[in-house]
Image (spheres, helix red, strand yellow):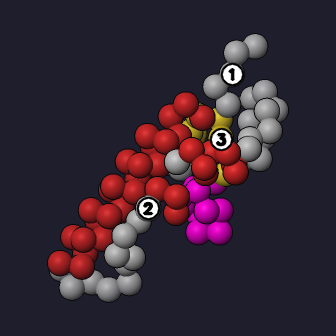
Amino acid sequence: MNCDHTVGYMHEFIVLSELSDKIKSEAYGWNKHAKTMAALGSKGYKDDYNPIDFLDGRRGYMTMFKHCPYCGYKINWKEIKKSI
């Protein structure tokens, strides 16, 4: 069985091979939104969203799986965080 290992959920299921691009895209979008809201005078947004912030399980940006739901592969989040 060939599996690309589903690692989490953020708007849709995320596979391991697409994780880096999705995280960087989300960080860019959140930064753009925060700057727009700051220009409109809204407060309460971070100044800068880093891609690594989205891999912090305490923040709740993404549901992070411990194992791939399709093949049972254990996901090594420490290695993934080092690569991003």
Total labels: the figure holds: 3
**Residue on which disc 2 sits:** 50
Which of the marked residues, 3 or 2, is nearer the chain's N terminus?
A: 3
Vertical arrangement, residue 52 with respect to residue 25, above or below: below
* In-front residue for pair 45/53: 53
Please identify, in this view, whether the residue under mark 2 or under mark 1 is nearer the observer.
2
Residue at point 24%, 71% (across, down): 35
Query: Overall secondary structure of the magenta stretch?
Result: loop
Q: Relative to 79, is 26 on the left or the right?
A: left
Which of the marked residues, 2 or 1, is nearer the chain's N terminus?
A: 1
- Disc 2 crowd rating (10 Å Cα; few below 14, some 14-19, many 20+) is some
- Disc 3 crowd rating (10 Å Cα; few below 14, some 14-19, many 20+) is many
**Residue on which disc 3 sits:** 7
Question: Of the numbered discs in the image, which one, if any, rests on residue 3?
Answer: 1
Magenta range is 54-63
**Where residue 45 sits: x, y (%)?**
37, 78
- The secondary element bearing badge 2 is classed as loop
Where residue 39 sits, quadrant-wise, is bottom left
**Where residue 7 sits: x, y (%)?**
65, 41
Badge 1 amino acid: Cys
Please identify, in this view, whether the residue under mark 3 or under mark 2 is nearer the observer.
2
* In-front residue for pair 41/28: 28
